[in-house]
Each structure stands twice: as C-alpha cells, then as structure tokens.
Amino acid sequence: MLGKVHISQELSVHTGTMHLLGLLGLLNVKTVLVGGAVFLLVMSLLQRKKYKLPPGPPQLPILGNYLEFKNDGRFYAVFDKLGKAFGDIFTVNLGFGNKMVVLKSANIVHEAMVEKKEIFAGRGAMSWKYELFSGGYKDIVLTDYGPVWRLQRQMALKAFRTYVSSDKLETFTKSAFDDMAALIEKETKPFDIDAHIRLLVFNVVCRMAFGQCYKMDQPEFIWLKFIVDETMHEVFGGLIPSDVITTLKHLPIPSSLLAKRLQKNLIRFHEVQLAEHKKTFNSDDVRDVMDHLLLLKKELTNESDDNVKESLSDTRILYIMLDIFFAGTSTTSDTLKWMILYVAAHPKVQEQLHKELDDLGKDFDNLRHCKSKLPYCEAVQREVLRMRPPAPAGLPHQTLRDTKLGGYDIPKGTLVSVNIWAIHHDPNNWESPEVFKPERFLDNDGSLKEVDNKIWLPFSSGKRKCIGEGIARVNLMMISALFFRQFKVSFPPGQEPDFEPAKIELTCTPKPQKILVQKRK
Ligand code: HEM
C-alpha cells in the first residue's frame, strides 16, 4: 500500500514536473513566436522609416501573404492577384519576413535588368529547397553574382556554342524525333502526348549534356521521369514548410525528407555519368557538353587562379549538368506541348504551318539553317512563348547594393522578381493579349518583325538572362518543323482545350489532356 502511495506520489510529482516543463516549452515557443513577430515588425517599421519602400498588399502577422502562396503555388498568378491594386512595382511577403519586390511593367523591368543590370544581377540565398538542389549554390542558376559564377557561365556557354555549331544536334534531334514519331503512329485513339514529347526532349537534351538516349519503356527513363515529376510537383509545386522556416529542414518533416531523397537520387545519377565520362574521356573525340567541360578543365590545369579552378571543379560540373537537366528539359517540353495544344485549337494556323513546311522541300535536309525560311513557324514559336512563358515569374534576382527604382528605395539584398507573365499579357504592350495570334510578329508581306525585347522576354533580360536560349530556340524550331510536317493535330469532338496552366511554383505546364494526332499524307 505504502509502496503504491509512494509510486503515485512520485508519479504526480513527475507528471507535475512534466506539465511544468511542457508549459515552459509552450511558453518558450510562444515567447519565441511573439518575440520573433515583434522583432520583425520593429525591423520592418524601422526599414520603412529609413527607406521609401514599394507598397504592398495587407499582410497577416508573421505569415505575411504566405496563405495566398499556399493556396495557389503559381508565383506569377499570386503576384498578379496581389499586385492588382498597385502600380508597376510592389512588395509581397512570402511569410516570416521573407519579402520580395515584384516588377510587373516593361519599363520598370528594363530600368532594373538592363539600365541597372550590375545592381540587379545577384541571386543570393533563396529558400531552402533551392539551396538543396544547387548543392549550396554551386550551379549557375543559383550562384550569386561574382567571378566564379561569371567563369562558370562563360565555360558552359562556350560548351553549348561548340555543340550547337556542330552537326550533332541536328543528327541526334532527327533520330530522336523518328523514334518518337514511330510511337505516335501506333496511337489510333486520342491520347496525352506528354510522355512522347518528354521522351523526345530528354533524348535531345540528355544526349547533348552527357550522351544518354532512352527508349520509352526503358526502366532508367521511367525512373528519371518519375524523379523529375516528383521534384517538380512535390518540391517545386509550391512553398514547403522548410522554405519558410529554414531550421525545419533538420526535422523529419515528410516534405523535407522527400526533397532530400530526390536530390540525392539526381546527384547520384549525375555522379555516375561524370565518372563514366572521366574514364572514357578522349580530347580528340569530344562527345557532349560534359566532355567539353572536362576538356576546358584539362586546359586549365596549370591555371593558378583559384576562382578559375573552382568554376570547373567536379562538384560545379555536376551542378551545371543538373541545371541543364532541370532548366533545359521541362522548359522546352512545356513549350512544345503548349504549341501542339494551341495549333490543335487553331486550324487556320495549322494550315499555314503545313503550307510553309511543305514549301521547304529539300531544305529539310539542312533544317538547322532554315530559320529564315520559316517565318511563320518562328512567329508561332514566339506567340506560344508569349502566351505561356515556361518560367512565367522568372527567377528571383537580388540587389547587390542600395538603389532606386520607379521612385522607390530598394535596399541592398532585396529579392526582386520579374512577372514575365504580366508583361506578356499587358494590353499596353499587346493588342488583345489573350488572343493567340502568331501574325502579330509578322509584317504584311509575311516577313518577321524585329522582336521588341522590352515586352517579349521569355528568356528574361540583363546579366542573368537564360544561357540556354540559343539551344532551346534551335531545338524548338527543328522539333516543331519535323512534327508539323508529319502530323496533324486536333481535339477530339466535344472536348474543349484547357489552357489554364497547372499549379506549379515557377513553371507554366499544361494540364494533362487528350488530343488526336494523325499522320499527314
Ligand atoms: C524554352 C526554353 C527556355 C526558357 C523559356 C528559359 C527561360 C529562362 C529564364 C526566364 C531564366 C531566368 C533568367 C533570370 O534570372 O533573369 C533562365 C535561366 C537559365 N536558364 Fe533557361 N530557359 C529555357 C531553356 C534553357 C535551356 C535549354 C538551358 C540549358 C541547356 C537553360 C539554362 C539556363 C541557365 C543555366 C539559367 C541561369 C542563368 C544565370 O543565372 O546566370 N535554359 N532560363
């Protein structure tokens, strides 16, 4: 009995202590949260006093505008919604004090990215998942402005240019296209063309990057497609908790664990490619971009400058490959899928495309050099990139010093996002911007107008402009010419096209939908 009392007394003392500790724990969390909120508020008021910052929509305490981003992962769409009441420039709060200045007019973007390009060229620390997938900012896309980024960018551009100017790109694109066309010909009913287009683009881009080429049912291709899909939807589909509170990355939260697992898989895959390339490297037979980078690295072995050495370290080469893999495949395949959907919904555009391609005759043998003979194809490509830019909110830049923009102060270290979508859909820039009209890029005699890069900027502008533009444009031109010469596309009777992009954070991807593809006579 006594023993029982003793135990129950001990238990109650123990439970009391637990409660006290629990309460203290709660108090601590509360104190930290309230303290944090007060700190952020005071800092924000002090900053507002010191600077004349761009205005912005109302925000919740601590959460800022986070819930808007949680409801719709698409940055460009949330920017559009939140920025309606403000002018060309406004501030949003992604949550927990993570602020971003959004630019949404052609003039203000030109002022920032072109006239003040040196100031707006930074990238800075973005949210946790970007840090994770760039190996702690070791790639080109996310590395901050500086000598290593500049050298890394120059090396990659050199490798891209050498590859594009060889005959390899056209030969491989045609062979990859033939494989895909053979699969399409087997489809007798309406189907979703996503897997076919992605196989084709993977084969063109992965062959260029590290010499790999796949079959549709090959386990490695199915695995890669799965990993990319998971990464795009589950990690880059919208803000995850560790993006907002970075310390959460250390906790076993499912979204953070998944992101780490996917990143590990992708790095392992690229490490295997790099090891194979090093084993079989021959400087007299440079096979792909990875070989080009290894050759440049070899030429620089005696270089004493540490920045030069770092720009082509094995880790940096790996992450350049990951850049090509991510930045190069989904952007190109999304553009092709939108093109097929828009052309299927506009029979007159399709007729005109077919006519131009039929008239090309023997020049098809030298497709890479045919751009000037295919003005209508080029106009269709430009209009698709205008209507559905693959990176509609670009990638956030960071200011490298205090500056002014549109009459407001922009302190050093501010994250700045360009809403490319808003500029491409602004009635001040485009007549009937919601209408798909390739002719807007043509003169009355059918020749191409000079493009106005202030209002057409799918590849962004300034110092961080896309380095894959040249490759992407040649690939898009060759693939679309091969596709529409051979096929006619339409929607099944009674099915409406869906042009609303899927809810993914930084890309503009069509939702799955079936189309009918028929071989032309
Ligand atoms: C239709 C295709 C593509 C579009 C629309 C596109 C668009 C973009 C955009 C908007 C940016 C952000 C620029 C900025 O920060 O202001 C970017 C950056 C970048 N893109 Fe692309 N891209 C495409 C294809 C490619 C391809 C094929 C590659 C590589 C083979 C590539 C590699 C890169 C890289 C490395 C960057 C980072 C540049 C830097 O930060 O210095 N892109 N792209």
Image (cartoon, helix red, strand yellow):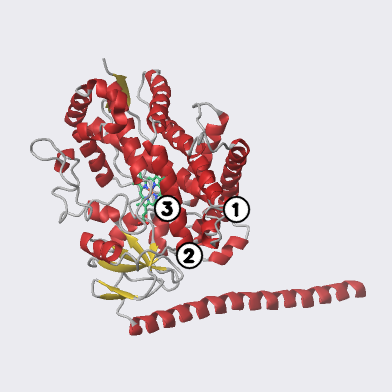
Task: Indicate the amino acid at tag 2.
Answer: Ala
Residue wearing tag 2 = 125
Separation (CA) of disc 1 from disc 3: 35 Å
Q: Residue at x 52, y 35 (%)?
A: 284
Residue wearing tag 3 = 154
User: Could you tell whether 134 is left or right of 264 in the image?
Assistant: left
The nearer-to-camera label among 1 and 2 is 2
Residue 79 occupies quadrant: bottom left
Residue wearing tag 1 = 257
Where is residue 470 shown, x and y percent of the image?
Answer: 34, 43
Quadrant of the image for the N terminus?
A: bottom right
Task: Indicate the amino acid at tag 1.
Answer: Leu
Separation (CA) of disc 1 from disc 2: 21 Å
**Disc 3 crowd, CA 10 A, few/some/many (<14, 14-19, 20+):** some
Determine if residue 194 is in view.
no
Secondary element at image label 1: helix
Task: Indicate the amino acid at tag 3.
Answer: Gln
**Residue at the top extreme, as displayed:** 521
The nearer-to-camera label among 2 and 3 is 3
